[in-house]
Image (cartoon, rainbow, N blue to C red):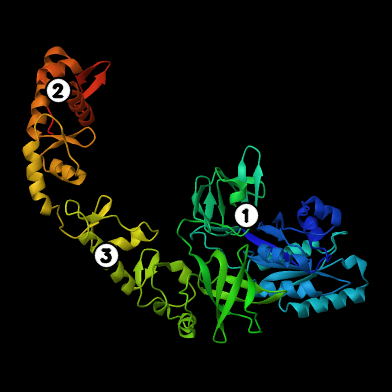
Amino acid sequence: MPLTVGTAGHIDHGKTTLVEALTGKNTDRLPAERERGISIDLGYAPLGLPDGTQLSVVDVPGHERFVRTMVAGATGIDLFLLVVDAAEGARPQTHEHLAILRLLGIERGVVAVTKSDLVDAETLELALEEARELVPGAPVVAVSARTGAGLDELRAELAEVAREVPRHEANGATRLYVDRAFTLRGIGTVATGTLWSGTVGEGDALRVEPGSREVRVRSVQVHDRPLERADAGQRVAVALPGVERSELGRGDALVTPGAFPVSYRLDVALEELAEIPSRVHVHHGTAEVPARVVRVGERWAQLRLSSQVVAARGDRVVLRAATTVGGGTVIDPAPPRHASAERMELVERGEIASTVFAPVRADELRGLGDTDGLVRAGDWVLAQEWLDELRAELERRIAAADPLDPGVPPPAEPWSAAVVPLLGLERRGAKLYLPGAAADLGARADAAAALEAELGLEPVKVEDAALARYLEEQGRLVRVGDGYAVSGAAYAEARDALVAECEAAGSITLARFRDLLGVGRRTAQLLLERFDADGLTRRTGDARVLRRRGTIAP
């Protein structure tokens, strides 16, 4: 299973140089980065380990001005590579990057003490000891990107840690947070990001959220290598035909349509209990969104966002003001506006049934407690009360439907196929009906009788299309043209005349058919077009011939 490792550490401690020594690729791709000698944006490289593990490396800037970029790169990574200069030791961004990793739940990684060739043995030993205290339990390796010392040991430690990392949900819904979008000649718009869950491949239909823009994947690459399908945990580039570069950017998410809520609010369980200001920037996925923090008790908050984000239960968020001030775990990605400590406590206690109402994907609840008391519908979980309300709403709509077709379309939602069978309604074609329900003329009985009294061979305009359709299904008229009808008997008489003529002469023209019936050209034309539509005749030049011998019922 592919994994992603993210660098972390203070500016000038050698992150990018170390990545190049490990991978052979300089991740500083921007001219400004190479001119100034510092990383400004995220960089990427593939890293193969001795045991065959394939890592995608995300190299992040270390400057304090680019911490927001660091957070965007750190979200979605599986393990960290913390870089500490042997001569300088831990510095301000070392500590802030570590805090961000902790808030994102990234617990496993390796510490590389760099530039080991530039210090004496005693200084190096002190640096190594400080690193062990800085990240207790993490392997610490002294390395020199210039001489290559320690690189093999570092690769081995990364491989060992990678074996301990939980694997991604390959069967889950696709979720990829975009960190770059650009245009390539002959390809079009390309979006890149770390694939959080699911898979993505050529031809997949996805949705860009926020915004609900439907897109289709033309091709997929992982580190410039074309693949039929990429797996969760990989750095992925997807080509999206028909999408303008301006329509996509960092913070957007490519997701399975309808799989994840898109919300202006998040309920979170706070993981840092220090003072958090009322106005913060919320970092989630690759998005950075201003928000108002509404504290709910001591341990929870509702984040009211200035724009929508795509989130799921269990996601981590980082809260920043002038610096990183805290974070939390999403306990409800689409909560009601009025938050309460009682409701949030129920979620944390695992009493999911008390908080779920509308359908939620069952995998979003994984790890949050049992779902006793909820209704299971395929991959969805929902409250019985919600199901009862949906049934009542559909029955109300059915009662208000046209008696000639007393059915209504099912909800056009991702959960529809799984939930609708639980409603006790009959599905006929594209509509839902009450069990045993049948069409009924009702108040239209007199109108139907009056219409039938008018019908003959000359087409009659019928304003009530539903009534015409019903009477035709009953064999009481035949529709011709756009909104016209003739009687069933007249249609049969005209059909018999046409069949007899074709069997005798081999074909029939419009003029001949008109004369046979003694009607006008327009009437003859409407009847012939209906015969064509019924499959009785086909047109060859100016004449019609029978498609098959015999007659067909109207």
Quote the CA–CA distance across marks 2 and 1: 63 Å
x, y percent for residue 185: 66, 38
In terms of sequence position, does the residue under pointer 2 or pointer 1 come before the other? Answer: 1
x, y percent for residue 524: 17, 23
Q: Which residue is rendered at x = 82% and y = 75% of the image? A: 128
Q: Residue furthest bottom?
A: 298
Q: Nearer the viewer, residue 47 or 277?
A: 277
The residue under label 3 is: 423
In terms of sequence position, does the residue under pointer 3 or pointer 1 come before the other? Answer: 1
The amino acid marked with disc number 2 is Arg
**Residue at disc 3, secondary structure:** helix
Quote the CA–CA distance across marks 3 and 1: 41 Å
Q: Which residue is rendered at x = 62% and y = 79% of the image? A: 278
Mark carried by residue 86: none
For the question of whether residue 104 can be seen, the reply is no
Q: Residue furthest right?
A: 120
Q: Which residue is rendered at x = 65% and y = 44% of the image? A: 183
Q: Residues within 10 Å of mark 2 (few under 14, many from 20)?
A: few
Marks 2 & 1, CB-CB < 8 Å contact: no
Mark carried by residue 249: 1
Q: Residues within 10 Å of mark 3 (few under 14, many from 20)?
A: some
Of discs 3 and 1, which sits in the foreground?
1
Tell me the quarter of the picture where residue 166 sits.
bottom right
x, y percent for residue 361: 43, 66
The amino acid marked with disc number 1 is Gly
x, y percent for residue 95: 76, 75
Residue 526 vs 282, above or below: the answer is above
Mark carried by residue 549: 2
The amino acid marked with disc number 3 is Leu
Is 120 displayed left or right of 506 in the figure? right
Residue 79 vs 412, above or below: the answer is below
**Residue at disc 2, secondary structure:** loop
